[in-house]
Image: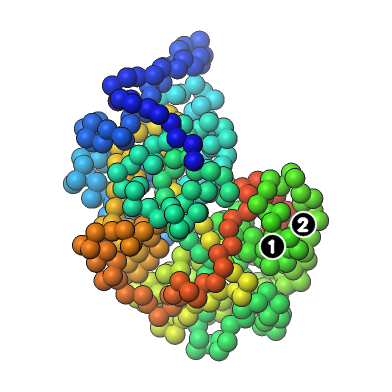
Amino acid sequence: MRRFARAFALAVSTFTAAVSGGSIAIAQSSPDPADWPALLEMAKGQTVYWHSWGGATDINDYIAWVGDEVAARYGVTLNHVKLSDTAEAVSTVIAEKAAGRTEGGAVDLIWINGENFASMKRQGLLIADNWAEKLPNYALADTANKPTLIYDFTVPVDGQESPWGTAQLTFYYDSAVLDTPPTSLASLADWVKANPGRFTYAAPPNFIGTTFLKQVLYGVIEDPEVLAGPVEDADFEAVAAPLWAYLEDINSHLWRSGRAYAADTSELKNLLADGEIDIAMTFNPGEASAAIRADELPGTVRSFVLDYGSMGNAHFVTIPFNANAKAGAMVVANFLLSPLAQSKKADETVWGDPTVLNLDALDPEDRALFDALDRGPATLSPDQFGETLREPDASWTEPLEAGWMRRFGAGG
């Protein structure tokens, strides 16, 4: 991974000039987390505007807890800007760059997904230096055993985003209603057609809907390796044809006859809880158990994955090039990597999101935080997931979403 040699960057400022409307905007270089004490001093009193998805109460509550902690520990104020789509934050940064706003940007931290990270990195919208790997707690991340922490949708992270959690596509069902779930694509299609109205997925570009497209694509494609390269190097229509055929085969048998789809994972969970569908899906392996604990789902809910593997990735936070509170954002990112924050996030009574840390490398006291956590009845053990299917190259996402919209969007 590329590394940038930077010494005493807090003491030495690098300036770039950008002309906007006849005026010169001066951008100062980023604070250097290699000098952590100096960065902590710089961060005191800063307000960090964290733009992240705001569609789940448990996640919002967790972020509020993070805000309380960083305020008490570091004097940093965290303002959660709730989004329905990460692209909203990206559009803000793009507009600011076009207007020549190279400092004092409205977005300090983003909970980013792979597609948007690739786009922002390509357009030079992120802090360019290797800030994430210099965070004190980054050394605890399990980069040796989890390649998804250093490659995001096959794009090298290069220290431009900091890992926050891992994800694995997981299906869940009520075992009191459905005795044996379909665990292959063929059996899923047969089950959907035999049980009309009892299955649906989220409409892309919602991340869980797009992930379902990728999961199916992996199962019907002849050569999955083609997905690791740029989409322009492949015959997209030929590669995607089996995916569209599969979805077309089940479409009229879906919930609401395929004329409408769920909005996101929260609606899928609610549809299952209300008895409208029998199988839901999530990118958080602990979500179903967490929902059981919260009395949002019955205790008979169980999880499963498809027999050829499960789509998996990591999620990250990143800092735009013109963030107003860069030091404060780095303090938040570092706290998110702490054993305290990671263990609380992994707690199914809080969120249940899997950790990015190498538990074997933790001090006994920190490891004990994770050992004390209980895995609920609907949480699969790591050996039950089988092969982890890595995300396709980021360039595949937009064509897949556009192709789905042409065929099935607005009820097809």
Estimate the spatial distance between the alpha carbons at disc 2 and disc 1, rounded to whole Å: 9 Å
Task: State the residue at coordinates (30%, 25%).
Answer: 8
Q: Position of residue 395 (x, y in %)?
A: 65, 46
**399 above or below 13?**
below
* Residue receiving disc 2: 239
Q: Position of residue 136 (x, y in %)?
A: 29, 44
Q: Position of residue 80 (x, y in %)?
A: 36, 46
164 or 143, which is in the foreground?
Answer: 143
Task: State the residue at coordinates (55%, 64%).
Answer: 388
Q: Amino acid at mark 2?
A: Val
Task: State the residue at coordinates (52%, 72%).
Answer: 385
Task: State the residue at coordinates (26%, 57%).
Answer: 340
Residue 223 visible, this orientation: yes
- Would residue 260 appear left or right of 118 to someone viewing this image? right
State the colouring used for the structure image.
rainbow
410 or 102, which is in the foreground?
Answer: 102
Q: Secondary structure at mark 2?
A: helix
Q: Earlier in the sequence, mark 2 or mark 1?
A: 1
Q: Position of residue 102 (x, y in %)?
A: 44, 24
Q: Which residue lies most toward the top here? A: 22
**What label sits on residue 46 in the rendered view?**
none
Q: Secondary structure at mark 1?
A: helix
Determine crowd level at label 1: few under 14, some 14-19, many 20+ residues with C-alpha closer than 10 A. Answer: many
Residue 172 visible, this orientation: no
Quarter of the image with the C terminus in it: bottom right
Q: Amino acid at mark 1?
A: Leu
- Would residue 241 appear left or right of 410 to someone viewing this image? right
Determine crowd level at label 2: few under 14, some 14-19, many 20+ residues with C-alpha closer than 10 A. Answer: some
Asked whether the residues under the numbered discs 2 and 1 touch, taking CB atoms below 8 Å apart as contact, a structural biologist would say yes
* Residue receiving disc 1: 217
